Image (tube, helix red, strand yellow):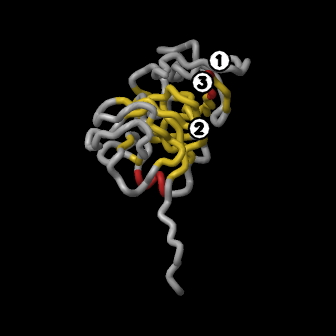
Amino acid sequence: MAKVTNWYTMNNKLGVNPNEVVVISSTSFPEYPAPPAKLGDRVQGNNGSEWCYVQASATVNRGYLVAIDANFKCAPLTSALSIAGLYTFGIAQFQATLANSSEFFWALMKVAQGATVIVDASSSVGNAGAALYVGGSTPGTVMVTAVTNRLNGLIAITSISSGNSLEVGMFSYIIPGLAVSMFPSSV
């Protein structure tokens, strides 16, 4: 399966376009005087995809993993955000290069295949099916060389090369892998 570059929804919800970033500006973009959906709205799409409407709280590049808070504001995923236990995770799959702070987009929450993520430049190469972890030097990216902050539910469909994009599948929601001790220390 190839990377999907033109996502569409299966719902009959008006104004849903997972491919675009929405900028609210009465002068530059008068067609959007307000967001076309409510933050947190969810829709189903092609390839078994599920989308959530979010607002960027920092610049988000296409293909970045994002951490989404309870108010549906998102930022590129970091190790600290992945273990905080306060966020859900998605992928920015819009057609634009990036979404600036305060702009709106549909974050991909899960998909059978065809999603694209960016591999951290410091990552080693890997084969399809390799475990993926939160990126090291660049927030929002993934890598295969880490030993902590595994991204359970995110599966590499194609082989991995550093600094490039990678096709992934998310058959369930992304869940951070936490180190759990079988034998807790006594108090």
Query: What residue would you read off at disc 2?
Result: 171
Residue type marked 1: Gly
Q: Quadrant of residue 106?
A: top right
Q: Residue at x 51, y 52 (%)?
A: 176
**Can see residue 135?**
yes
Q: Is residue 182 above or below residue 111?
A: below
Q: Is residue 9 left or right of residue 97?
A: right
Asked whether disc 3 touches disc 1, contact meaning CB atoms under 8 Å apart, the reply is: no
Query: What residue would you read off at disc 1?
Result: 15
Query: What residue would you read off at disc 3?
Result: 47
Neighbourhood count class around disc 2 (C-alpha, 10 Å): few under 14, some 14–19, many 20 upward = some
Residue type marked 2: Phe
> In what element is the residue under mark 1?
loop
Give the CA separation, mark 3 to mark 1. 20 Å
Q: Which mark is first along the chain, 1 or 2? A: 1
**Can see residue 100?**
no
Q: Residue at x 46, y 52 (%)?
A: 81
Q: Nearer the viewer, residue 150 or 32?
A: 150
| Label ID, residue 57 | none
Q: Is residue 154 above or below residue 27?
A: below
Give the CA separation, mark 2 to mark 1. 26 Å
Measured as percent of width and height from the top left, residue 109 is found at 58, 36
Q: Residue at x 59, y 40 (%)?
A: 72
Q: Which mark is first along the chain, 1 or 3? A: 1
Say which of marks 3 and 1 sits in front: 3
Q: Is residue 10 left or right of residue 58?
A: right
Residue type marked 3: Asn
